[in-house]
């Protein structure tokens, strides 16, 4: 027996390692290169674009030109997809002039004199730790920062800070300083045969320096603090540029070009954290959940097999008249539950959400939603949600007909409007708050109209089509007949209390995802990339298995205690993991984020509430269908007189 268990354990371990290696291979082989970049000849013009200003303290993005930075002769907006607009991206042309593989030093961009209003605007953004985001050849700008603690490695942060706060030596007064000199480094890979080059990195080191010059200012004025002719370059911020009204700020920049391997194009963006902790955490979580799932499955199979064998043997014995356990409630187990219409709507919505997440992960895992495709993930999820309305209508109407329902149009209407209406109401309130802050994250009216069209013009008709097709099919017959008079449920033990068992049931599904949830929240709220969709898909599969098994186990215990009201409890058991998700989001807010503004906190909890609602219908539907399959299976396996 021990040898057999050891052999099974080794086989399981090998299978897990194989799956993990496959996930890593998928994530790296498809994802890292991103989209194909352009080839540039020496001297070709490189178009630098500016994106939104972002802050992890406020979570409110702003347009780059909302601050009085240097502007080109004409500001041209780039076309954004639906996902980019919802993310608050506002991509515009920049005043910087780059020539491929031609270094430039101490280029003067412009000279700005601050007034009360502009100085206040800069100070507010510096105080909120806003970062400037730029793009070159579809690569975002990163700022290399020393990891510290004696480590030679660097951490790449997206964008650079608008400025910094500090005090002069011997003074306690807080001052604001502007990063007015940018030292850009463009890394490239050169083709030896054609001499063309591809951009594989875009870095910056910001400096704050109070520029000085002789005489009166003109376009040809040469700076004394930054002059390539005298080999005087900016390498530190010893004499920083203070932000005060009537202060003169001169913006300058350097551009350097360095050769680099092509394979490293996305390394700076995707290797931002200590990956070792990430991998070990996920592997540990998967091992624990797989072990628990295997134990649960083994217990269930052995217990059920013994029960069914015993019940079928009793038919030939005198004890057959004294039924016990789950067989005793066979005449009530398929009784139509209270609020059955609402349950149908929730199940249909869960199927819609499950289909959206599953297909999105498949596309992401295969590399179709590369991080270089900004907004692609959100656009894909929205479109998939709309088209999955067909399956939502089908699932809700099939269940509705099983509950002897006749008005399929009513159930289709509720499925098409209930969950989207709740999400839309929260979204509109949050969008109004963003509008009040004059943030670029506010969704424009044109995009709002597009979202409404996707809902009413595509999703709603598809839900009705799916409901029509589902209702046309014959109803699913119950394996046993339902008694006309409901059976009285005996008094239950304290641990079988519905609230207690529901809350207990949500712990294991949440435990399957909470480590991965940490990295997802970090990528969303701390402005980092998330790209390990191979592992995420594996965790998602584990979540499905865990939701199904824990719900089936608790449903079995419930039926054994002669409580046949399993319909809603099966949905709520696995769905309660959404409560733990929201509580974890609150814990993350207080421990990892530095949000202090009320509006920003409302945005965070509003969006996490939407995510928790989606997680509730998704996990609840998995548990419901698992229990439905389980009850139909066991009651069709025993002889009922």
Image (cartoon, rainbow, N blue to C red):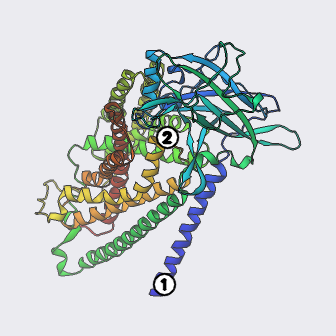
Task: Of the two numbered discs 2 and 1 on the same chain, state the one appearing first in sequence.
Answer: 1
Viewer-proximal residue among 191 and 339: 191
As drawn, which residue projects farthest toward the right? 193
Q: Residue at x 62, y 39 (%)?
A: 372
Q: Is residue 379 left or right of residue 25?
A: left
Residue 329, compared with residue 73, is above or below; it is: below
Horizontal and vertical percent position of residue 371? 59, 41
As measured in the structure, the alpha-carbon distance from the residue carrying label 2 to the one carrying label 1 is 49 Å
Horizontal and vertical percent position of residue 589? 35, 44
Residue, disc 2 = 527
Q: Is residue 348 left or right of residue 16?
A: left
- Which quarter of the figure is the N terminus placed in? bottom left
Horizontal and vertical percent position of residue 346? 32, 43
Q: Is residue 456 visible?
A: yes
Q: Residue at x 35, y 73 (%)?
A: 299
Dot 2: few (<14), some (14–19), or many (≥20) neighbours within 10 Å?
A: some
Residue 296, compared with residue 618, is above or below; it is: below
Residue, disc 1 = 4
């Amino acid at each position: 027996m021990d040898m057999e268990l050891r052999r099974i354990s080794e086989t399981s371990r090998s299978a897990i390692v194989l799956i993990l290696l496959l996930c890593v291979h998928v994530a790296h082989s498809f994802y890292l290169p991103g989209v194909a970049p352009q080839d540039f000849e020496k001297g070709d013009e490189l178009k630098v674009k500016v994106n939104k200003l972002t802050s992890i303290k406020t979570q409110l993005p702003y347009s780059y030109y909302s601050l009085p930075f240097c502007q080109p002769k004409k500001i041209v907006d780039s076309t954004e997809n639906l996902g980019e607009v919802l993310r608050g991206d506002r991509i515009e042309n920049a005043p910087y002039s780059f020539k491929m593989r031609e270094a430039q030093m101490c280029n003067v961009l412009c000279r700005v004199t601050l007034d009360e209003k502009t100085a206040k605007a800069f100070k507010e953004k510096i105080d909120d730790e806003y970062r400037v985001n730029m793009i070159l050849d579809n690569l975002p700008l990163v700022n290399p920062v020393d990891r510290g603690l004696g480590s030679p490695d660097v951490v790449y942060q997206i964008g650079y800070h608008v400025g910094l706060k500090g005090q002069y030596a011997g003074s306690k007064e807080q001052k604001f300083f502007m990063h007015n000199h940018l030292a850009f480094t463009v890394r490239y890979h050169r083709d030896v045969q054609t001499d063309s080059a591809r951009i594989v990195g875009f870095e910056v080191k910001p400096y704050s320096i109070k520029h000085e010059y002789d005489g009166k200012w003109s376009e040809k004025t040469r700076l004394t603090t930054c002059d390539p002719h005298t080999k005087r370059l900016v390498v530190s911020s010893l004499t920083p540029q203070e932000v005060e009204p009537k202060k003169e700020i001169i913006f300058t920049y350097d551009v350097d070009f360095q050769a680099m391997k092509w394979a490293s194009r996305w390394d700076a963006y995707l290797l931002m954290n200590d990956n070792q902790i990430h991998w070990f955490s996920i592997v540990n979580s998967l091992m624990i959940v797989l072990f628990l799932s295997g134990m649960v499955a083994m217990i269930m199979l052995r217990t059920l097999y013994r029960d069914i064998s015993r019940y079928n043997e009793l038919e030939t014995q005198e004890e057959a008249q004294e039924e016990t356990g789950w067989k005793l409630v066979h005449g009530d187990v398929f009784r139509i539950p209270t609020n059955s219409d609402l349950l149908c709507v929730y199940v249909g919505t869960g199927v819609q959400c499950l289909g959206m997440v599953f297909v999105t992960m498949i596309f992401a895992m295969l590399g179709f939603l590369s991080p270089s495709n900004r907004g692609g993930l959100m656009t894909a999820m929205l479109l998939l949600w709309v088209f999955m309305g067909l399956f939502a209508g089908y699932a809700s109407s099939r269940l509705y007909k099983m509950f002897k329902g006749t008005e399929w149009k009513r159930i289709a209407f509720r499925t098409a409007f209930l969950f989207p209406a709740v999400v839309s109401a929260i979204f509109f309130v949050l969008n109004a708050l963003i509008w009040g802050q004059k943030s670029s994250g506010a969704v424009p009216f044109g995009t709002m109209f597009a979202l409404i069209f996707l809902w009413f013009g595509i999703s709603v008709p598809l839900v009705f089509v799916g409901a029509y097709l589902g209702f046309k099919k014959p109803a699913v017959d119950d394996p046993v007949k339902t008694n006309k008079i409901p059976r009285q449920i005996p008094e239950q033990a304290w641990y079988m209390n519905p609230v207690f068992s529901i809350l207990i049931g949500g712990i294991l599904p949440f435990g399957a995802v909470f480590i991965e949830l940490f990295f997802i929240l970090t990528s969303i709220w701390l402005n980092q990339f998330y790209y390990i969709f191979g592992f995420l898909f594996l965790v998602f599969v584990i979540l499905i298995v865990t939701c199904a098994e824990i719900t089936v186990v608790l449903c079995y215990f419930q039926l054994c205690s002669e409580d046949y009201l399993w319909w809603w409890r099966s949905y709520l058991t696995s769905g309660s993991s959404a409560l733990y998700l929201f509580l974890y989001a609150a814990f993350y807010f207080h421990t990892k984020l530095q949000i202090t503004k009320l509006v920003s906190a409302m945005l965070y909890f509003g969006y996490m509430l939407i995510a928790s609602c989606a997680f509730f219908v998704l996990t609840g539907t998995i548990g419901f269908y698992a229990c439905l399959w389980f009850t139909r299976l066991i009651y069709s396996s025993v002889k009922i007189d």
